[in-house]
Amino acid sequence: MLIAALGPHIPFPAYGVGTALYKNDKSRFQTEVVESVKWAVQNGFTHIDCAEAYGNEEEVGIALKDLDVPREKLFITSKVTTSIEDISAALTTSLKKLGLTYLDLFLLHSPKPFKEKNIPLSKGWEALEKELGQGRVHSIGVSNFYVKDLEEIKEKATVPPRVNQIEFHPQVYTHMKSLLEYCKSKNIIIEGYSSLLPLKKDPDGTVSKLVKSLASKYNVSDSLILLAWSNAQGVFPVTTTSKVERMKEFLSYKSVKLEQADIDAITAAGEESTRPLQNF
């Protein structure tokens, strides 16, 4: 059971179909999501990260079908968000929309809906554990869980989460430092989303100015500097873009080796301009 929970090797970066590709009007089929996923895979991404809440699993499924890539060559993650009363049924629905027989990784998307519906987190985790070894899920994990949430499921868990996917960039480092240390001590992989948020939300801020300066020093884009900083913290990125040239660029993030002084400078700049966490 523990081996199943740990699952296979996870390729990074992951291509996320949330944020920029999030579907506000869930009744509208989005051709742009189909094309974006196809471009991502055709340009080297093998890990596709989606979720029930994004409302675009059907589009991802059509993209995967059109690509005709052997299933074993891809790593597909999805998350359950609102359908937490019956997680087995939620998994069935996600697999049907995606046109798949199994997920490589299945996550509890957030503690928030459990708290709103007064359902113990441990019950949700128990439902995920039941899916292990049944063929429909190869590994399980969580998203947006903090130390207190992880401790809550630990009380009754028989297997550990494979990953914890969280918001991660220099401006939330202060909020996340203790969580990083906790997850590393428990061998829980940290996946980071919104890694480039400082550049998008605070382009003239302390972090962005420093990152742009370092981009010139290393002769790479400012985006790659931030991804390299996350990598230096032991955090693996989930990225989103609809531009092919940026897809190719993001795949090279591990090749950027920042000097320790620059890593520390980015961390310090983030601590000086701390942002509140996104409310998920």
Image (cartoon, rainbow, N blue to C red):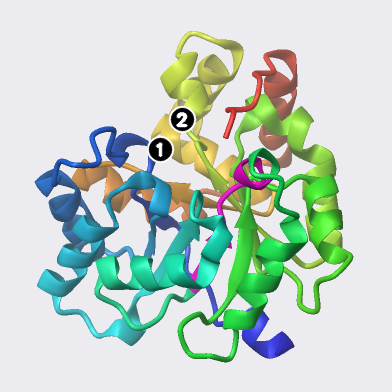
Query: Which residue is at a point 41% across and 46% down the rendered structure image?
Result: 53
Residue 46 seen in render: no
Disc 1 secondary structure class:
loop
Give the residue number, with chain letter if any, for mark 1. 220
18, 173: nearer the viewer: 18
Give the residue number, with chain letter if any, for mark 2. 215
Residue 209 picture location, percent across and down: 52, 15
Disc 2 crowd, CA 10 A, few/some/many (<14, 14-19, 20+) = some
Residue 34 seen in render: yes
Query: Which residue is at a point 38% across and 37% down the rendered structure image?
Result: 19
246, 241: nearer the viewer: 241
| Left or right: residue 115 compared with residue 182 | left
Q: Are marks 1 and 2 in contact (CB under 8 Å)?
A: yes
234, 51: nearer the viewer: 51
Disc 2 secondary structure class:
helix
Say which amino acid is labelled 1: Val
